[in-house]
Amino acid sequence: MNQINRQAKGDFESLKYYGQPDPLGLRQLKEAWDSRELLLSFFQRDLLIRYRQVFIGVLWVLVQPILGTLIFLLLFYFMGARKLSQSDATVFWQDASVILLGILMWQLVNNSLRDATGSLVNYRHVITKIYFPRMLLPLSSLLCALFDLAVGGVLLVPLAAWLGHSFHWQTCWAAFAAVLWLSAFCFGAILWLSSLNAQYRDVGYILPFLMQIGMFLSPVVYGFDRVENSLSKFWQIVYCANPVASCIGLARWGVLGSPLPPVLGLMLAGLITIVLVVSSLIWFQRSNQWMADRI
Amino acid sequence: MDVHEDTSIAIDVEDVSKQFRLGTLGEHQRITEAISSKIKALLKGGASGASQGVKDFWALQHVSFQIRQGEVVGIIGHNGAGKSTLLKILSRIVTPTCGRVGVRGRVGSLLEVGTGFHPELTGRENIFLNGAILGMKRSEIRKRFDQIVQFAEVEQFLDTPVKRYSSGMTVRLGFSVAAHMEPDVLIIDEVLSVGDQAFQNRCMGKATELGTQGRAILVVSHNLAAIANICCRAMLLDHGSIVLDASPKQVIDRYLQGMRADTGTVNWNTTSAPSSDRVRLHSVSICNAGRQSSSHQVDIDQPICIRIDYEVLREDTINTVQVQLKDENGVYILSSANAPSMSLTQDDFFSKPLSVGRYRTECELPANFLNDSRYVISLFLGPEIGKPTIRCENVLAFSVLDTGAMRKEYLGSWYGPVIRPRLAWSTVEAPL
């Protein structure tokens, strides 16, 4: 009977049906873009909540990388990797800027993964009560981490300028490309992690541990020159297949003039990032179908 | 319904079914569980082993209907009939197992008031956040901001964090934001029936107003009076299927019929009985006072007795019994409990520690009090009145039969009034 009705009256046309096929998960990207205002609201909320009832407010964003840099510098001098008497102030500041840049980039990964993983689960009560593109929740965590990076960049730029690095086009685009690339990597990772965490809470427990390992597997607190000194060419490429390592290497090359990681490694890391992003989109789209049932 | 034949379809539900899995499988909270069950399944041989011990449960089965623009449609059904699942599918929160749902225009779903309110944020910030979650654009919220604030009556608390609001204020603010979105299709759940009477009236008024503006509205409610008043069409959902799609009056009639036990008794066996950790219900029955056998039809000129049998499972249990009476439109008539100040007779067991065993509490409604109509009883048992641990809403229905006791002088219809008590009348000569 429905069928007859359907043909007789054209008024079923222009109805929008839910759950259109979306094998590559591209439709959800468009949907997320369409509700970018909501993304901004979430982003705003996350920022506001972070600094509510916090005395020094946004300064915390600066305190963390500065303290981190100081601690690792002291550690190096303490362990004798550098000797205070032999080196002059320039070497010290050079080390500081290398570590600071590493820590800032690492914070983007660390903060976005840490906050995004729990984002869906923490907003379970919203997800089960109303529909909106769920991707926005982890994305908002990523935006927050990018905000931290931008504020931290304010520290680094004067430091680099003072050290005598001149800023030309190469600096800008390399830094920009590195951040964009790292964001893409984080995007893929948080889509996987947040949706997996919605079903398996283990993800939330194992993540801090993985992040600790990841921090030492990436050139966060040491320069790429150390990797060059201690690893063979083949292992250098393997090392750089880690997108985080490649991104930090690229950024340091652009901003601080450090050696460029092997190109083959960079390409491998790029490929891995692409696979991660595409697979995460497909997976997230699929997980959307059971999200509200199982979260 | 005929009125809207000319408008176009706003919601199309096409053969929608939703399956849930009961049991442990598919609900693994841990990766290790998932892996170990996969391994177990492999060892048992074949993938079919995985489905052992899992019960499939169909929350909805082959549900199809269309709603046209301007229609206000109510959905009623018992707890567990699939109402919430249907609303969640329509709001796109849950994906149906099969079938599809189509809508025209913007969908606003209101399954909860104040979804996404954050306690740390101020009223102002929450209005924008909640509005955005409900799908409003920032410019729209800005445009209606003053109206929202005015409607919620929170002007002086706008810059106070919501965590310091009273619960009433939070609900008002949440509803106010929702009331100012202008969706083409609005889906409202029971939640709107929380709050006081004035608030409910406002909700209902708003829903009716939206309906006249040509929007399609779908309401789920236990409040039958509300469904009867604001809806132009209703659907009865039972065990996941739509059993009746007709005018609200017809659907409400059928719904009440369905819950009416023919014998005037509801008996439970020990497994299915409503129970708390201290008390388990056995049966509820209704009869004319003085008669032993229960009947769903009682005479209007005899006192009516509501008899509740239950078992106390633990020593020193304190129990109170409360009864609520509604008419067939869901209009709430009375509520009473066995407390001394509410009872004509002394109930010695009220608020006394009871020992293990069976008890029977009876409540008598006076003769010549109810009209000749159908009534529904709800039961609440618990250690304190107003804090029940066992709630049986709409557990038993009964009809009051007109025996003609009040018809010696008047033969016309008594249709309309909820109660028909005999009152004390007198006329005296009062010369000026």
Image (cartoon, coloured by chain):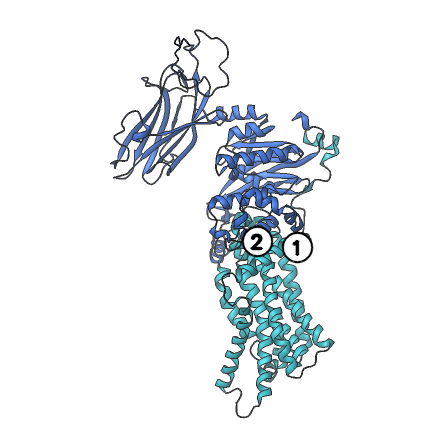
Chain colours: A cyan, B blue
In this picture, residue B233 sits left or right of residue B412 = right
Q: In the rendering, at what x and y percent does residue A7 appear?
A: 74, 32
Amino acid type, mark 2? Glu
Residue at the spot of label 1: A36
- Residue B384 visible in the displayed image: yes
- Image height of B4 relative to B57, above or below: above
Q: Which mark is residue B125?
A: 2
Chain letter of disc 2 in the image: B
Residue at 69% across, 74% down: A174
Quick one: SS at disc 1?
helix
In the image, are marks 2 and 1 on the same chain?
Answer: no
The one nearer the camera, B145 or A61, is B145
In this picture, residue A179 sits left or right of residue B350 = right
The one nearer the camera, A117 or A33, is A33
The one nearer the camera, B3 or B238, is B3
- Image height of B361 relative to B33, above or below: above
Residue situated furthest top in the rendering = B409
Residue situated furthest front in the rendering = B432
Amino acid type, mark 1? Arg
Chain letter of disc 1 in the image: A
Q: Which mark is residue B268?
A: none
Quick one: SS at disc 2?
helix
Q: In the rendering, at what x and y percent does residue A258 appear?
A: 65, 81
**Quarter-of-image position of residue A104:** bottom right
